[in-house]
Image: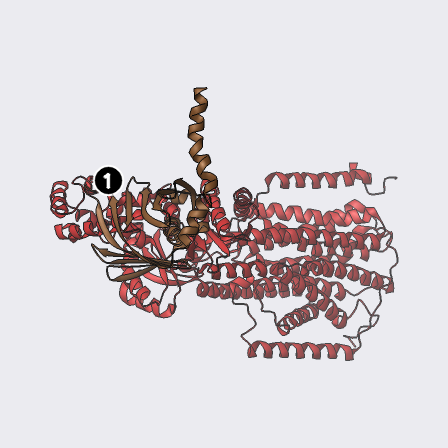
Amino acid sequence: MRGWWWMAAALLPWMACGPAQAQAWDVDRLMQQLAGIPDGQVSYTERKYSALLSNPVVSSGVLAFHRPDSVEKEMRTPKKERYAIAGDEVVVTRNGGERRFALSSQPALAALAASLRGVLLGDQALLRRYFKVELQGDERAWRLMLEPLDASVARYVTRVSVTGSAGRLQSIDTEEASGDHSLLQVQ
Amino acid sequence: MAPRPGSRSAFAHPAARYGVALACLCALAVGAWKSLRIETDFGAFLPRSSTLEHRLLISQLREGVVSRLMLIALDGADEQRLAQSSRDLVERLNRAPDFDYAGNGSPERFLEQGEVLMRNRYALSPAVTPDRFTPSALRGALEEQLAQLASPMGMLARRVMARDPTGEFLAVLRELDSGGGPGLRQGVWFSADGRRAFILAQTRAAGFDSAGQAQAMETVRGLAAQAAPGVTLSLTGPGVFAAEARRLIERDARLLSLCSGGFILALMVFAYRSPLAVLVIALPVAFGLLLGMLLVQAVFGSVHALTVAFAATLLGEAVDYPNYLLLNAAHGEPLRAAALRIGRTLALAVLTTVASALALALSGFQGLAQLGVLTMSGILAAGLATRWLLPWLLRVAPAVPRHHVPSLTPTPMLKWASAAVLAALAAAAAWTAAAGSGPWEEDLAALSPVPPGLRELDARLRADMGAAEAGVFMASAGASAEAALVEAERIRPLLERWKADRRISGYDSPSSLLPARDTQMRRLAALPEPAALEAELRGALRGLPFRPDAFAPFVRDVAMARGQAPVSRASYDGTPFGAKLRAQVIELDGQWLAVTTLSGVADAAQLAQAAQREAGSASSLIDLKRISTRMVDGYRDDALRQTGLGALIILALLAAGLRSPARALRVAAPAAAGLAATAALLVLAGVKLSVFHLVALLLVLGVGLNYALFFERPPQDEEERRRSRLSLAVCALSTIATFGFMSLSSTPVLHALGATVALGALLCLAFSALWSPSALSIGHPWAA
């Protein structure tokens, strides 16, 4: 008899909240919220952790996003570097030179770009093309786990976990196959 | 049947004689079945050559990288699916025993196969100099690695960072990238429009090994069916050409032999209405074919599949002799007497045909030489069998049903008119040839038995892939492989400058994989001692956030490299690079050549001059197209000379055999006229004459002389004249039908041969009938 009580106690909050909420909290809802954020830019700080490093390398800059499909990552410290992704092309400006890559020529880079674009622009289809998508937590504190579908991507990137609160992005943690990971935090 | 007077032997009974003949034939057939080795290497149809340049061309065509490359295109699905199919198929091809390697441009694959490059990076990287390892240079390299780590692109560099902070592996990869090549989508080669994915595979079989290539194509199709169901597969490349050409020629030859064999059989049945006569006619042909094949096997060590395919041409000629004998004998006449009567004409017909095939037998193209030997021996055997075997077998001439063959009485007017027409034709042809680019085919590709459809597909795929045809390369010669590689290295600064000026789009030098020994030793000597490197590294790391031991693998690798032997060909054994080097560094007659392939050469002549100035005579620019054109010219000149020689021998034979130069000329004139008219008509029709047309014209000469000879022999009475007409009609019909069928072939070579000989036989027949004094008419207009 005692067991029943426990179960009822566990189920109660769920039964109470469920019908009360206007819409269920799921990936669709999250992506809708992210898609609803107007074009603009956010500042970020990124920490790279590596087995080669005694201290993480810290860099910072600005992430800018414009629909339908362009995202720019502009590093301002410790040095200036710019990665502009638009369409299938990424333009890398560093060391005073400019280089262009077709994203489709490098599946791992394409996946990385997709994680950034998918989250910043709220493009669920793009995310699902490259990753298995799993949502944890609740609307106030969610965590989106992205696992690469393709082996040629998984050779470099094992997982990307994105955290946020409602429509606000908080961090992107990219775990690499080498054991390194880099944590990008949005201010 | 009662024994005939004079037949004293055990072979008095005809069944015994046929039994013996058939037993001999069976023995020959079994011998042929057991001993014939059918060769399928298309290289047999390449000329033997005397100059180094030509031999180089042929070795490149035969064994070179280019000739073994198979281009595989996948289309008919969306990009993602095509990319996945490409990756799967490459994976499977690399495990298949028919292929040395397969690639789809994926950097992944290159990294996997590149372990040997990683291991030897300090000997291979052109960036390795003593300056590379000073504290300040190391500091710069480490700072760059730090920036890499922080960048999103750093993931790719991270794999080898601890072992290779100075980036030598990347430098080696850059060195090996010859430039050009198709773009990547989804990490694999794609056409610019993204509709077609490309794979390049190197077959283990040589490009001209058509059977091996066919096997490799089967393998690709089988693997693709598993890896990429529903995706459309197209294959091209020199090897595919060889295999396809062989398949088509064999199919055509089989079909056409069946058609012409069937037609000749029907013609014989119609003419003789007797199975025995048809069997007797078939015997000399069968003996000729089998003996000819066995002789070719004995002389050349093997019989080419194409020689077998062409054997049908022999059928058309060999069948003439027994026909001529049987149809010329009166009913009931002892066949031996008839054979004796026409013996001289028969012998001359056989010998002149043999002489006309002499030019073929002497040809530098081994395939043509085989055909020549087959024709000479086959015709000789068929002639001997007609002269001696048939009278022994048949004893008396069989009754031949009366067939009405229309007769023609050429008036002197008609004779002169035909001569005038011939002269006009010849003049018009000469005019056409002089006004145009000459009557000769200069392009080796046009001689290729590859159907035009496949060549178009190849051109389209190559254009799509952005791959230039590898027709121009630099050959660097030396007394040893090492010496040749030193020369290949010496030419690189020039090529580098030309590449920078965009006067070539890229080059692929074997010295990237195998730098000269001195160069390698210099690089390895530039590596610091472990203790010194460690000290410098410690200094360079000061103030950077790297762990102190982060680059221990680097120090270890450098120490190991210092003790390493220089990279040699053996270092690459078992890797795709080994297969590539085997084709790029070759030994030819005790001399070594390092072959640097070039693409997108704007001005070959200027590059040749620049190379001469810069590197002396050790390296020379080879333009395959130019050489092959010159070579075709050379062989045509040879063929013309040999044809001339054959014609002289024929005239001498005729003069000796007919015991009169005037009669010899009278026989030769219609055949020569037929030959000239045929050549003139071909030129007027816009056909470019090739070696194969020369071969065909030789066959025309043989056939034409036969007719002229048969026409020339003065008949005794109206009955014999009637029989002569019949025999000529049957012979001409069988020849024209055999080659007429062949002209229906879609294969350029077979079509050229068939059309030329059929036309030539018809014209020769016409000129013989018009100009010869006897056979068709009662009077002797020539004498009139």
The answer to whether B591 appears left or right of B713 in the picture is: left
Q: In the picture, which quadrant includes the N terminus of chain B?
A: top right
Task: Please provide percent x and percent y for residue B74.
Answer: 52, 52
Q: Amino acid at mark 1?
A: Ala
Residue B86, compared with residue B781, is above or below; it is above
Residue at the image position 23 percent from the left and 51 percent from the top: A59
The answer to whether B380 appears left or right of B783 in the picture is: left
Q: How many marks?
A: 1
Task: Please provide percent x and percent y for residue A133.
Answer: 43, 43
Q: Label 1, on which residue? A: A51
Tell me the SS state at disc 1: loop
For residue B246, say whether it is visible. yes
> How is colour applied across the structure in the image?
by chain
Residue B13, compared with residue B328, is above or below; it is above
Residue in front for this viewpoint, B84 or B477: B84
Chain B's colour? red
Residue B335, compared with residue B565, is above or below; it is below
Badge 1: chain ID: A
**Quarter residue A5 falls in:** top left
Residue at the image position 34 percent from the left and 46 percent from the top: A164
Task: Please provide percent x and percent y for residue B205.
Answer: 48, 46
Task: Please provide percent x and percent y for residue A64.
Answer: 33, 58
**Quarter residue B657 falls in:** bottom right
Count residues near mark 1 (Cα–Cα under 10 Å), then give few for <14, some for 14-19, many for 20+: some
